[in-house]
Amino acid sequence: MAALTSGAPAAGSTDPAPAGPPAPPRVGADRARRAGRVALRVGAVLLRRALVLAALLAVVFAAVEILPGDAATASAERGDSAAAIAARREHLGLDRPLWERFTDWMTALPTGDLGTSARGEKVADLLRDPFPNTLALAGAAFALTIAASLALGCLAAARPGRRTDRVIGHTATTAFAIPDFVLATGLVLVLSLWTGWLPAVTVADASGKPAEWTMMIMPVLALAVPQTGWNTRIVRGALADQAGAPHVEAARLDGLSTTRVLLRHALPGALPVIATGIATSTGMLLGGAVVVETLFNYPGIGTVLAGAVAGRDTTLIAGSVALAGAAITLVLLAADLVRAKTAGAGR
Amino acid sequence: MYVNRRQLLIAGGGIGAATLVGCSSQGGDAPAPQTTGGAPKKGGTLRVGALGRAGAITRDPHGTQSNESDYLVLSLVFDTLTVPAGKPNTAPRLAASWESAPDLKTWRFKIAPGALFHDGSPVTAADVVWSLRRLRNTKSGASRLPGIQADNITADGDATVVLVSDYPNAELPLLTRLSSFVLKKDTPDGALDKAPGTGPFKLDWYRNGNARLVRNEKWYGGEVLLDAVEITMFETAQAMSNAILAGQIDLASNVGPVAARIAETRKDLRVVRRPNDMAMPIVMRAKDGPFADPRVREALRLVVDRDAMVKQVLSGYGTVANDIMGTGDPHYARDIPQRTRNLARAGQLLAEANFDLGRTYDLITTEDIAGLAESATLFANHAREAGIRINVVKQESGKFWDETWQKGTLYTTYWGTNDSVLFLGSKLMVGDAGQNEAQFADPAFDDAYRRAVGAADEAGRAAALVDVQKIQHERSGYLLWGMADGIDVATAKVQGLPTLAGYGRVQLQSTWLR
Amino acid sequence: MSTPATSTDTAAARRRYARRALPLLPAALFLGAALAGPRLAPHTIDAPVTATYATAGDGALLGGDQLGRDVWSRLLHGGGELIGCAFLIGAAVTATAALLGCLAVLRPRAGRVLERTADVAILLPSVLGIMLVALAWPDGGRWAVITAAIVLGIPFAVRVVAAAAAPLAAAGYVEAALMRGESSLSITVRELLPNLRGTVTALFGLRFVEAVYIISTAAFLQIGPQPPEADWALMIRENAPGILLNPWAVLAPSAAVALLAITVNLATSAPAPAPRR
């Protein structure tokens, strides 16, 4: 029991430094072999993540398929004849089997071709501007979330059961229970319509980006606050679980300061849980973007996605999900690394 | 909350030139652009917000337009042959004038003298013919230029275009109001995004639904006052409403009644009401089923509390209607007595028709446009007071249009072009109408319709039009309780805004800033 | 409380018990109020009684909503189903995840399968998942949201439980139990779960509140409860455009949702073992 986190120091490299100065060629071979092994392992992890992404896209493709109606009827005009709709269906390739369309789409992916939307536009073109915009928005919110939730979680854990802890706990819960759209509406009301401090919506300029950086503030807050609430709970919970661990108890009995016990002994052990929790919340972050971007008229993939689902636009949905999924995959990979390092690379 | 596919129908120009055609005036006289700020002044940039969806963007003037923002850009950069107006409901634009042969089949349109493309080249009949044929040959071409084959669009010299209809059609010029955008002959599909138009504004840039347009100094239609128009696309009316409240745009196009009520509390904002913008009738299937008996349909029309509907569903931004579609028509029959609530008479009619009051009837609706589902809910309340049990079923839009529209026995629908009784009659009510929503078939109606549309003389036409409306009022499958106003909100400095319903709102060529 | 304590010992025990029960009180009161609400409402939920977005007063305590219906009456009606659904989702997700999470660490092969499934699910933003489920099942209403929320919530929760259980699985007594050939279920129930109480109760609290969040967001996307139902989430969405006209139409249900989250959180964090002695 006591052994489980003893090897945890997060920053420690697992590669022992070569002892002494052995013959140069041997070291080279060793290093090369080790590098090869590492590359292989990294490659395997990447491949696994890529497969996971492909599986997700298959699921999305299939799910859109069972929605009532399809892109041909969804882009139809009132009064279009059945023949016109059938012609459009043929034109869009919707009369071909599902797996065939999916394979075509997947094989074209590596070339950067995301297919053609239901309305005949290149999906890659439709997402070219929105995707970086969403990355900027979600990235800022994510950074803010990590910083705030670590700080608040540690602050709460430093005074377990006291008022600070309780206040932070309840505030955090409230923060993530309030739906982003309520928060967003409130922010607009207070920071824009009543006070006039910030622009209420995002207006894009000729470059396709928000015309002013102040337009980002409210969308970032609306995304980050619920996430922070969620992640603060995770940080606090993980630290609480660690508080009972023997080596933490031991450190406390040794008379080390609370802060030191927390940061040097409890936090490293809690990192795997924290990393997992925070990483998995990126999905929620991008999901929240659908709502927040729509409300602030932010030109990102959230708005595209919301419209695409209403329009039954399979390739556009899949394209958006592919990009969002790729972004989440990167974050999960980062979390994998943290876990591998701190939990002693269990597998 | 999303602009969905059918929304564009009304919204987008989608449903054929004619559907979008929306111009009307409540009082019957031509609505002058509203102006309060003294003599028109040149200069300034107008920032406009319009609804649209990123995935539905289209740059093809003849494509399926579902975004109001795109339609706004197109109609300022390109010109149509005719445009919506007040009385009469069709006014000249790129076609300076038109005339028909006595048979009402052959129509000749004369191109406005001095009309130039933005690259300086003159507009010829060949350009117009090419553009109209291109429009006719799109997938929805048959419903956009109904009755006009592509081969029957020809040039006569450099300045005259001849359209020959398959059947007499006194309202043919009306069909060219909303989507007959004229491009240069042989514009390749790949170059549509930069194709020069003939309109009052030239394209400066366009990106992801947002655009900036600059004044066309040489517009043949008169002096354009604004330096530039900046168009921002909004996914939701709520975001657009916030934008105008926060001063980020100068004009929120078609933003709706809630924004209007907020704007009315502020001195720096003005509400523009455009009457007869949207009809949201309840459709009762006339062919068979529980509402096949005309007495039952009349009873339901007597059950609804029209004033309450306008007050609650439209927040008061609308007018009571009289079960006749096309309230914005200059020939709308105002002298047919207004039907009002009469529960006693309704009960009597239901009893005579042996209507089953023990059953619950489903009223199917969607949330395609604001207020539609609410109208169904309120109507159900009114019906309950008359002992009719109605259960409101809200369907997802796709399912509604696939399964309920034209097939259901009781459902809500909506139409955005309301300035022609005949157009709606031809589309919805004649026996063989393509979109006969109520499956209404009435020989007397068909006869009156044919007399009206084929009449060469004004008097005969007017008489037949009254018959068309009387029959509708008496026994059609529609319960039209009211008409929603189109509502724009603008800052106080914006002058000369259009007051036409429907797509008349895009006519910003004479708008100026104080 | 009125009977005098016979000994200091029982009094202390009682006080301790009272202190333990205290955090449950707000939740109980709030839930009671939400359930009794419909009986106290002065008006029906679907009849207009005032002008649209009428301000508070004038016969409607909290003003009118977007159809002029009484916000106060709708508020009183609107809690029951939201609470019920959130509870159902929270409980189902937590229970399933607790079992699967432990299974994942005890049986590496099952663990890998679960891990891969979770990986896929985690890449799907829950909002999108709910949209897909609800659109594929248009008549599903609330059940579509509940199903989607459970299915999409489990993978996340499994990972949280697994991450917390992983260190325990390596512990000697669990390994010993595994050696003895005890079933995974019995190890889970006897050895792992008792040590994961903190994680699991906190997880339920989180999942409940998260369920409230998901149901509300779904309602915002017009999925789930349908008009004219009075549902807090639906009320917030329906009335948001009129927030400047009658703020109560939005603030009141928002506050109700927040209160619900806080009281439940208070209750679920109460029985967790206090980290200090």
Image (tube, coloured by chain):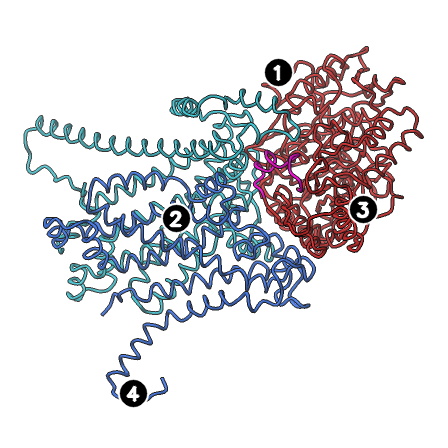
Q: Which mark is residue B336?
A: none
Where is residue B379? Give x, y as percent: 69, 51
Instruction: For mark 2, name the chain.
Output: C
The answer as to whether the residues below labels 2 and 4 share one chain is: yes
Chain with colour blue in the figure: C
On the image, the x and y values in percent for residue B243 come to: 62, 47
Q: CA distance from mark 2 to mark 4?
A: 48 Å
Chain represented in cyan: A
- Can you identify the residue that label 4 sits on? C5
State the residue position of label 3.
Answer: B37
Q: Chain of mark 3?
A: B
- The residue where tag 2 is placed is C150
Identify the element where label 4 is drawn: loop
Instruction: Give the label, 1 or 2, closer to the camera.
Output: 2
Describe residue C258's horizontal placement relative to residue B44 as left or right: left
- Asked if one can make out residue C46 in the rendered structure from this viewpoint, the answer is yes
- Residue B188 got which mark? 1
Residue type at the position of mark 2: Ile
Distance from the alpha carbon under mark 3 to that under mark 4: 84 Å
Tell me the SS state at disc 2. helix
B97 over A297 or under it: above or below: above
Callout 4: few (<14), some (14-19), or many (20+) C-alpha neighbours within 10 Å? few
> What is the chain identity of the residue bearing mark 1?
B
Q: Which residues are magenta?
A: B395-410
